[in-house]
Image (spheres, rainbow, N blue to C red):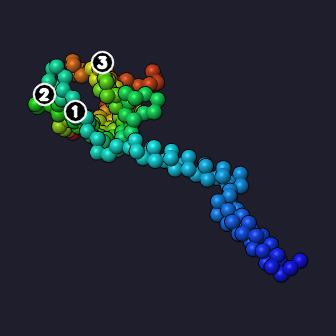
Amino acid sequence: MSKKTLIQLSLLVLIFTLPSIFYFKYYYLNKEDAKKVNQSLKSKESSNINQSNLIKDLQYYSKDLRGNVYLLKAETGSPDEKDPDLIKLQNVSAKVNFDTKNEIFITSDNAIYNNISYDTKFIGNVIITNGEHKVNCDFMDAKISKNVAILSGKVTYDNNFTKLNADKIEYDLLKRTSKISMFNKDGKVKITYKK
């Protein structure tokens, strides 16, 4: 074999080898690596979808035919994936005006708001204040569509004269009457009068 043929053959091998090495080193992924990359991309995409659905500084306002005003604010919220009418809210505050003299303030850790019926479920560290009246509970279901609010879970009512502990308070928003009860029929509502 001549020297010229040997050099040509060496160059030909080098021309095919270098691109192959470059391809396998930088572009080729084995199946395991491809799975990992694909899972990582899906995870990032899911995270981006959740972040893109997160809404900050939400505010809902409604007024009924009787002139009652309902204002709901939340730091963040996101639509419910199963029911588009529901919105999950975090760090919630609400103000309800039954008339110009009667304002009720509500705060809670979380809430689920129905943007069709305006019904709202307040969840976690629920605090309701109206002048000197204050109620703490774990859960409040404000069924605006049915004109009733149901408070439950370690309900404590406090004002200047009385302190009350119960499991459940059902409040009629139109009649402004309440029904206080315990879950256990043998349990008793505890009322303490202050001096």
- Along the polypeptide, which appears first: circle 2 or circle 1? 1
Quarter that holds the C terminus:
top left
- Whether residues under marks 1 and 3 lie with C-beta atoms below 8 angstroms apart, the answer is no
Which x, y percent locates residue 13?
Answer: 77, 70
Which x, y percent locates residue 49?
Answer: 45, 43
Q: Amino acid at mark 1?
A: Tyr
In the rendered structure, find residue 146 and report the number of the disc placed on it: 3
Depth check: 134 or 182 in front?
Answer: 134
Would residue 171 be visible to someone looking at this image? no
Q: Distance of mark 1 from mark 3, alpha carbons?
A: 18 Å
Q: Residues within 10 Å of mark 3 (few under 14, many from 20)?
A: few
Q: Nearer the viewer, mark 2 or mark 1?
A: 1
- Along the polypeptide, which appears first: circle 2 or circle 3? 2
- Along the polypeptide, which appears first: circle 1 or circle 3? 1
Quadrant position of residue 29: bottom right
Q: Amino acid at mark 2?
A: Asp
Depth check: 165 or 150 in front?
Answer: 150
Left or right: where 30 falls relative to 89: right
Q: Residues within 10 Å of mark 1 (few under 14, many from 20)?
A: few
Which x, y percent locates residue 162?
Answer: 25, 34
Tell me which residue sits at (37%, 23%) in the image. Answer: 181
Quadrant position of residue 71: top left
In the rendered structure, find residue 99 and report the number of the disc placed on it: 2
Tell me which residue sits at (66%, 52%) in the image. Answer: 34
Left or right: where 161 falls relative to 34: left
Disc 2 is placed on an element classified as: strand
Would residue 27 be visible to someone looking at this image? yes
In the rendered structure, find residue 61 and report the number of the disc placed on it: 1
Disc 1 is placed on an element classified as: strand
Left or right: where 10 falls relative to 145: right
Q: Distance of mark 2 from mark 1, alpha carbons?
A: 16 Å
